[in-house]
Amino acid sequence: MKFKKIVSSVLAVAMSVAFTASFYVPYIENQSFVSYASEGINVAQHTQDEIKQYIEAHPFDMKAQPVYTVQPSTTAPYEIGKLDSATEENALNALNCMRYIAGLPEVTLDEEYSRLAQAAAFVNHVNGSLSHYPEQPAGVPDDIYQLGKTGASSSNLSRGTTRYNLAQCVINGYMYDSDNSNISRVGHRRWCINPSMAKTGFGTVGNTSGMYSIDRSRQKTESNVCWPAQNMPTEYFSSSTAWSISLNKTLFEDYVEVKLVRSSDKQEWNFSTSSADGDFYVDNGYYAEPGCIIFRPSDISYNDGDKFDVKITTEDSTIEYSVNFFSLDVKENEQNVVGDIDNSKKIDVFDVIAMKNGFVTDFSGWSYAKMKTADINGDDMLSISDLVLLQQYLLGQIKNFG
């Protein structure tokens, strides 16, 4: 009786809160239920299922060794080398997956851009260093050096023990961009998700790689591109990764304020020049687009189902949007027990709390599989009757949901 009394109390609270939300939320198979209420973010809106499907259709291997149709030679007679199409496509898929997540169109490979990126990687590898303005290596012919110099000044560059893999360069290098040397501007990331970009090219020699980045051949329609995106796979965003949004205008740092709120517990992180709950930068450099706001919250993690609300104010605008994190590895059949909403492998009062939170947030960020576990009466919509049935089950008033 004591347990039922406690459960009844919790359920009563859940019921009172739930009735203040929408009465029901219909759901459709294989759709993602995300509220796209935002002000100021102008990119394509892709659901979580659409993102999963795109990534499945554009696979990439982050461990594959590069393959060449022409092998590089770093001694006389010098040869910059040429990657085979599969190696370049692997890198392109990684880049296009990141752009799709960000709500941007695909880019294509350009043969001349690939030649420039390959030469940039070659010259930097021979020098044993990394520079956008490399010196001419001893013995390297002028034509190769000039090609590499041009490529290096127009490319994202990467060097390290695993940087032979171009897909890894894109995701763990350029898109991460949160190390001490790059976090204040996240310039590599901004070039990767530049709305004006239409073409690119890749190159790699040894442990040095390049991606041609400074292409502006597309007439853009998108604005205020943010990372993490409004639907964001947890696999591509860690607790050490910085958030960013590019506004394409000069910003006055002292007027910029950011407020980040986690929906589940209402914890806040605030950022400004006077006080910041983590790292905070405003960069007006022309890395694709100027006016980039960068912030990295301290003591944070990102898990499947987490939702964060962002409010950014500048001297002349306010931008509000939400980021819903989800895992690419969560399969629908891993969470299919009706009533086990939090996927804890048992039905208890915490499932009631999870459903209550769902009503409060209009089930924002819930996958189809999770929605299905909350559809207690099986009528293809989520309503208070589902919550009542769950209450009755926990109180022992009904034996099953059938």
Image (cartoon, grey):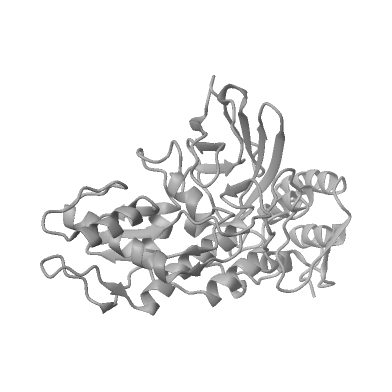
How many marks the image carries: the answer is 0
- Tell me which corner region of the image, top left, top right, bottom left or bottom right, holds residue 13: top right
Determine whether 201 is above or below 21 in the image.
Answer: below
> Residue drawn at (45%, 45%), measured in percent from left and top?
187
In which quadrant of the rendered image does the C terminus lie? bottom right
Quick check: 307 left or right of 35?
A: left
Determine whether 155 is above or below 370 in the image.
Answer: above
Quick check: 81 left or right of 138?
A: right
Residue 241: x %, y % from top left:
46, 46
Regarding residue 65, the answer to whether it shows in the image is no
Asked whether 294 or 394 is in front, the reply is 294
Asked whether 174 or 122 is in front, the reply is 122
Q: Residue furthest front?
A: 142
Regarding residue 175, the answer to whether it shows in the image is yes
Asked whether 290 or 110 is in front, the reply is 110
Residue 144: x %, y % from top left:
24, 62
Residue 125: x %, y % from top left:
21, 57
Quick check: 38 left or right of 77?
A: right
Q: Residue furthest top?
A: 274
Residue 23: x %, y % from top left:
89, 55
Quick check: 43 left or right of 67?
A: right
> Residue drawn at (72%, 64%), measured in percent from left and top?
371
- Tell me which corner region of the image, top left, top right, bottom left or bottom right, holds residue 60: bottom left
Determine whether 244 is above or below 276 in the image.
Answer: below
> Residue drawn at (54%, 42%), measured in percent from left and top?
244
> Residue drawn at (39%, 72%), measured in percent from left and top?
88
Asked whether 180 or 236 is in front, the reply is 180
Determine whether 319 is above or below 43 in the image.
Answer: above
